[in-house]
Amino acid sequence: MRIFSFEKLIAWQKGRELAQMIYKITKKFPKDETFGLISQMRRCSISIASNLAEGSGRNSPKDKARFSEIAYGSSLELLNQIILSHDFEYIAEHEYSQIREKIIGVNMLIDGLYKSQINSIK
């Protein structure tokens, strides 16, 4: 089986794990959030890994960096939604802390990837 370059990225691997966590946790949300927070959170979590994958297929470091920026933005959007979900008492404190730490870890990896892509432009 062929392995693509994005599959080797730790940021992508951790983003994939984050998406799995989000899907599991949102299964417990109220059904009236199906087209609200559930849908939005799932799209954001998928967007993180998807943009990292798409960026890996670009030829220029500038294009790669742009997709890393988009992935980072999606992770911040997801963090906001996790905070709101906690505020609305859809997720417990321990789940909130666990997911928040995962998002922070993914952000750090994306930031490192972005910086390496930008540095290769100079």
Image (cartoon, rainbow, N blue to C red):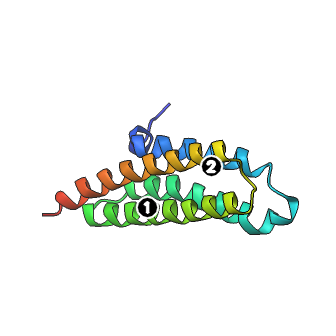
Provide the secondary structure element on which disc 1 rests.
helix
In the depicted structure, whether residue 82 falls above or below residue 109: below
Residue shown at 68%/62% (left/top)? 87
List the residue tagged with mark 1: 72
Q: Is residue 112 left or right of residue 41?
A: left
Q: Which quarter of the picture shows residue 57? A: bottom left
Mark on residue 56? Answer: none
User: Which residue is disc 2 drawn over?
Assistant: 96
Pointer 2: residues within 10 angstroms few (<14), some, or many (20+)?
Answer: many
Front residue of 40 and 92: 92
Q: Considering only vertical position in the picture, is 63 above or below 95?
A: below
State the quadrant of the C terminus.
Answer: bottom left
Q: Amino acid at mark 2?
A: Tyr
Q: Are marks 1 and 2 in contact (CB under 8 Å)?
A: no
Q: Furthest-top residue in view?
A: 1
Question: In the rendering, at what x and y percent does residue 65 appear?
Answer: 32, 62
